[in-house]
Amino acid sequence: MSFFASKVKIDWEVDPDGLERHAECVAAKALADLQNTGIPDIPIRFSGEENLQTRSLPLEQHKLLLAHSISPLPLYKTLVLLDALIQDKNPCYEQYERLALAKALISSISNLYFGPEVGVGTIKKDAAVIEPWLKGVQTMVNDLKVLSDRDVPSQVLQGDARSLPGLLPRQSVDMVITSPPYPNEKDYTRTTRLESVLLGFLQTRSDLRSVKHQLLCSNTRTVYKDNHDDRYITDQSKIQELADSIEMRRIELGKTSGFERLYARTTRLYFGGMYRHLADLRDVLRPGAYLAYVVGDQASYFRIPIRTGALLASLAESLGYEAIGIDLFRTRLATSTREHLREEVVLLRWMGSK
Ligand SMILES: C[S@@+](CC[C@H](N)C(=O)[O-])C[C@H]1O[C@@H](n2cnc3c(N)ncnc32)[C@H](O)[C@@H]1O
């Protein structure tokens, strides 16, 4: 989903007027289809009597959605719009129209809210779909008109940040600015789940599993038996001590749930994955390259502090990087300890292999 959205956002080649005309035709078709079933796009005021016959997603896809993330009626309208997009499909406009739908889904059609974690907020029984979608396309059209003369070449590559050499040429990168995962029990596939399912990127459980497999392990829901990233950090004493102390605390507290048993392994897999990324990256960096990593400290594993930034800086040094600083970006209040946790920017420099 992120790859798709990024790819569309940097492609300014489309004819904006053609896109607008096409989207208006699709909207008219979808509105007519809705009218035929007696359902208007404008939200219905429910009196409690309604028994509307709608259709839904295939069960397997439906099960991938976060529960109650979208109500049946807005879902139905979205499926009608998707049908209209398929029937009037135009390869020149398709990607913009699909991205506009993703945006409308998360901003107004669904019951989701981002605070900043994704969650289900007020459940609305109905919501307009065609109207906010068309407005989204019109916003794109206006942006494209403003940007049309600018020649700013950019490229988005899809890959796993732990294995880069096949993706990027040797010594081709001057700067890295990124916000990688932190060991924070956040399942990043949930953030984009609704639009990933509705746009068809995720159709089965196994699609979801294969996306999760490509992610750096940062939470107990993405710990897989065949992930061996922990092997890369067996001689990193600070990380080993940290993981051991988490496991010791678990035993002391008598905590035995499946997730709690995985905290120590998650910590090892996380830093092992970041080690792999930093190790692989060396080959594609040009000597003199600067790097900035935004990461946060954590205390969600039995309140044991994980100083992510400091640990990553020392991991990077062991790989030959210069750690040139750790800037405080902001602090966050940890709900478990009421302590302020640091969010930092770890600044590194790569001067080339010694
Ligand atoms: C802290 S979030 C940053 C999100 C992004 N900066 C943004 O503002 O939307 C970390 C991101 O890293 C992605 N990620 C996790 N493992 C990855 C991997 N192995 N390779 C590339 N990206 C990965 C996650 O999917 C997530 O979107």
Image: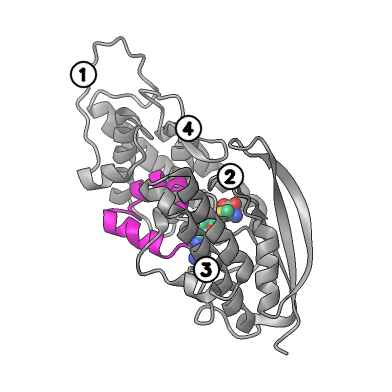
The mark closer to the camera, 1 or 3, is 3
- Distance (Cα) linking label 2 and label 1: 50 Å
Mark 1 and mark 3 lie on one chain; the one further toward the N terminus is 1
Considering the numbered disc 3 on the image, is that residue within a helix, a strand or a loop?
Answer: helix
Image-based side of 331 in relation to 123, left or right: right
Q: CA distance from mark 4 to mark 1?
A: 23 Å
Extent of the magenta region: 186-215
Judging by the rendered image, the residue that carries numbered circle 2 is 303
- Ligand 1 quadrant in view: bottom right
Measured Cα–Cα span from mark 3 to mark 4: 36 Å
Outermost residue to the front: 252
Q: Earlier in the sequence, mark 3 or mark 4?
A: 4
Q: Residues within 10 Å of mark 1 (few under 14, many from 20)?
A: few
Q: CA distance from mark 1 to mark 3?
A: 51 Å
Between disc 2 and disc 3, whose residue precedes? 3
Residue 161 percent coordinates (x, y): 53, 69
Q: Nearer the viewer, residue 193 or 57?
A: 193
Q: What is the secondary structure assignment of the residue under circle 4?
A: helix
The chosen color scheme is one colour
The reply to whether the residue tagged 4 has its Cβ within 8 angstroms of ligand 1 is no
Residue 12 shows in this picture: no
Secondary structure category for the residue under label 1: loop
Other residues around mark 3 within 10 Å, as few (<14) / some (14–19) / many (≥20): many
- What amino acid does circle 1 point to? Asn
Q: Residue at x 47, y 35 (%)?
A: 119
Q: Which mark is residue 273?
A: 3
How many circles with numbers are drawn on the protein?
Answer: 4
Amino acid marked by disc 4: Ser
Query: Is 174 left, or right, of 138 in this rendering?
Result: right
The vertical placement of 40 against 19, above or below, is: above
Q: Which residue is mark 1?
A: 51
